[in-house]
Amino acid sequence: MTPLDWKRRAVKYYSEKTAVIDEDKQFTYKEFGQRTDQLSIALHEADIRQGDHVAVMLPNTHYMLESFYGICQLGAVMVPLNYRITAEDMEYIIKHSDAKMLIVDEAFSGPIKEIEDKLSLEEIIIVSVEGQETDLQGLDYEAFLQNIPENASPPEVEIDENQLLTLNYTSGTTSKPKGVMLTHRSNYLNAANFMYHLGVSNDDVYLHTLPMFHANGWGGVWAITAAGGTHVCLRKVDPPHILDLFEKQNISLLCGAPTVVNMLVNEPKAKQTTIKTTPRMATAGAPPAAALIQKAQKILGLNMIHVYGLTETSPFILYNEWRKEFDLESADEQATIKVRQGIELAFNGETKVVQQDGQEVNWNGEELGEIITRGNVVMEGYYKDPEKTAESIKDGWFYTGDLAVTYPDGYIEIRDRAKDMIISGGENVSSTEVEGVLYKHPDIMETAVIAIPDEKWGEVPKAIVVLYPEANVTEEAIIAYCRDEMAHFKAPKAIEFVDSLPKTATGKLQKFRLREMYWDGSKKVN
């Protein structure tokens, strides 16, 4: 099982169909196949062999797509890099991953230039960008390919499904980033889940809103090719441009974190945009608020699909399967149901919520436990880190660190990350539950709820809030609103108004950065 075989199939059956749209450039599957083969041959001539590691730091462009296929069909391992991390973390990852070569976008070459002398790369390939200049020494990507004949065949490599396909680094918050080892098999089965559960078809036009470096675009880099769909590249998340692409390219499918959904529904242009395709949008990365899902479906007509996973699980392990009986519920209740992470996907294996003793929680929607999973999509382990691997995988089960409940119908719903749960006076307060209430407030555009120290209760909830530009509301009014909507001990004891919230490149809230301001380096920060 290798997702690389899907490129062969796509070239065979969809050769003249548009495979990739990247701004003013387009490639058919035949042309895309030729370019990936040229890259493979060029890499082979540059002494990249099976098992070698190649780091790639590119935005969502056709070059990034080509790298996934061109590197990996050699039997080499691709190391996708987050281009928003610090130069220090880049240096650590490139060294730790044992990368022999780096392919980098010219716009992101500054941090690499800072650490160039500390790296032992055999070669740097630079993707030139109009209007950008760099002092970084390396070969131009197109020049790297230009001497390779278009119809040349890459070297034949015997690939084992259990060998590494990609080495994906998690963002380090309390320690150095960890390298997640994902195989051909785990990528294949995750992409099969992507295809089946997101309903991917040959007619789909997929917008790469989600960074491809993040868990291999959740599998989208493989799944769209498998179905013979069209990849539409997006260099950066720009809501007005995304809305234009909805209309211009008839986008039918996309993925993104709830913060991206929030950006789209709050884009002024959204109410004037006519979207004819009713795009399906998968969201994950943080539990979305029911109010946000409702807005996305009402304002943009998006069909929201809630999925759940982690880089360590390739990433999908749960999805919110929509059932006909849910259509009978009110719009509010439908949005509440869609907040649940849901049930196991068809090809990933087993997932459940367990108590500390390992026993599964009762399916009552109340008993809290940790989500654990085992099966086809779980990582091989953390690269060169058996200790961290042993901490995460116990008796064949991967422990996610996410706290959840299971409803009578088997649907799982996350209540919080273990580190984000607020314990106030001995009572558990879910930060996501409080955020869900806050998102219903008409003046609140975005929010994050964290624990802050309290002499009496140990810790209490505090809400960091981004208001709509025209909003005029006080801290006291928001606290009163929350107390009317939930148990008083769960309501925030303090509100802080800010212009923006810290996020990762994939749009996930970085609550640890907010906690740093109040916990002064203690364990609660992590």
Image (cartoon, helix red, strand yellow):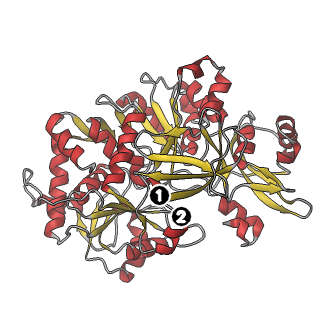
Across and down, in percent, residue 214 comes to 44, 54
Which residue is painted at 17% across and 60% down in the image?
A: 158
- Can see residue 461? yes
Residue on which disc 1 sits: 312
| Left or right: 238 as drawn, with respect to 18 | right
Label 2, secondary structure: give it.
helix
Q: Label 2 to label 1, Cα distance in Å? A: 10 Å
- Which of the labelled discs sits on residue 519, or is there none? none
Element assignment for label 1: helix
Q: Quadrant of residue 180?
A: bottom left
**Which residue in the structure is indicated by mark 2?**
392
Q: Quadrant of residue 412?
A: top right
Question: Cβ–Cβ below 8 Å for labels 2 and 1?
Answer: yes
- Residue 375 picture location, percent across and down: 43, 51
In the rendered view, does 188 fall on the left or right side of 478? left
Query: Which residue shows up at 51% across the image and 69% down it?
Result: 390
Q: Is 320 left or right of 467, judged from the image as shown?
A: left
In primary-sequence order, the first of circles 2 and 1 is 1
Residue 75 location (% of width, % of height): 22, 62
- Name the kind of residue labelled 1 in the image: Glu
The reply, left or right, for residue 360 in relation to residue 435 is left
| Labels in figure, total | 2
In the rendered image, the quadrant that contains the C terminus is bottom right
Q: Residue at coordinates 34% horizontally, 68% vertically from top-left?
A: 134
Residue 157 % position (x, y): 15, 60
| Residue type at numbered disc 2 | Ser
Looking at the image, which is closer to me, 199 or 518?
199
Tell me where residue 418 sits by quadrant. bottom right
Closest to the observer, 246 or 325 = 325
- Circle 2 residues within 10 Å: few <14, some 14–19, many ≥20: some
Q: Is 327 placed above or below 279 here?
A: above
